[in-house]
């Protein structure tokens, strides 16, 4: 089972009036998921480059989460502390994969997450109903795009395993 929607909803649900509170909660859920999967990869990955990539994901998404938490606190928006059930299921499934299969599925999942994330954050830059949320989303896009490119490189590596 792989998560097809990074933030837990269909991109088409976003119109020209995106609810910023919902977006921030979904972004928090996704960040928790990425950090958790990447911590798992640090423990389980067999390839040293996959482990190094996972360490980068943990560091970057922990920083994103900190800034997101500050923004949400200023807006009095409560954020989740745990992943939703769908993401927990994906995490459990990946945790049971052995060796190289784990490496490949982790990188595949990270590619899906970043592709969907870029689409959602791009929508938020235009349609979020709060200016500060739009600005925060815009600041995250270059990071997410860099992660996507790095994930594509990692996908080439894991495909050759």
Image (tube, helix red, strand yellow):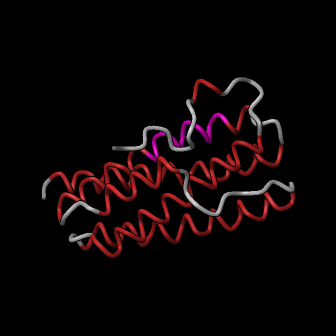
Magenta range is 113-123
Name above or below for residue 119 compared with residue 161: above
User: Is 97 in front, or is 128?
Assistant: 97
Image: 14 above or below 67: above
| Res 37 → quadrant | bottom left
- Residue drawn at (62%, 68%), measured in percent from left and top? 63
Q: Horizontal and vertical percent for residue 39?
A: 42, 71
Residues 15 and 92: in front is 92
Quadrant of image for the C terminus: bottom left
> In the picture provided, is 75 more to the left or to the right than 109?
right
Q: Image quadrant for the N terminus?
A: top left
Q: Residue furthest left?
A: 161
Viewer-nearest residue: 154 or 8:
8
Q: Residue at x 48, y 59 (%)?
A: 34
Q: Is residue 80 magenta?
A: no
Most prominent secondary structure in the magenta stretch? helix
Q: How many marks?
A: 0
Residue 132: x %, y % from top left = 82, 48
Is residue 113 rendered to the left or right of residue 127? left
**x%, y% of residue 2?**
36, 44
Q: Residue at x 45, y 69 (%)?
A: 56
Q: Position of residue 11 (x, y in %)?
A: 57, 30
Q: Is 122 contained in the magenta span?
A: yes
Q: Which residue is pictured at 25% across the width and 74% down the height?
A: 48
């Amino acid at each position: 089972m792989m998560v097809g929607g990074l933030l837990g909803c269909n991109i088409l649900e976003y119109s020209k009036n995106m609810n910023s509170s919902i977006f921030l909660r979904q972004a928090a859920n996704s960040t928790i998921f990425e950090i958790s999967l990447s911590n798992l990869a640090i423990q389980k990955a067999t390839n040293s480059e996959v482990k190094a990539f996972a360490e980068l994901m943990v560091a970057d998404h922990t920083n994103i989460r900190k800034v997101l938490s500050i923004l949400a606190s200023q807006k009095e928006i409560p954020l989740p502390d745990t992943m939703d059930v769908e993401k927990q299921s994906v995490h459990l499934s990946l945790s049971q994969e052995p060796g190289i299969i784990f490496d490949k599925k982790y990188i595949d999942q990270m590619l899906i997450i970043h592709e969907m994330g870029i689409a959602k954050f791009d929508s938020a830059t235009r349609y979020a109903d709060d200016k500060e949320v739009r600005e925060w989303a815009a600041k995250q896009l270059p990071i997410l795009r860099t992660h996507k490119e790095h994930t594509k490189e990692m996908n080439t590596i894991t495909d050759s395993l």
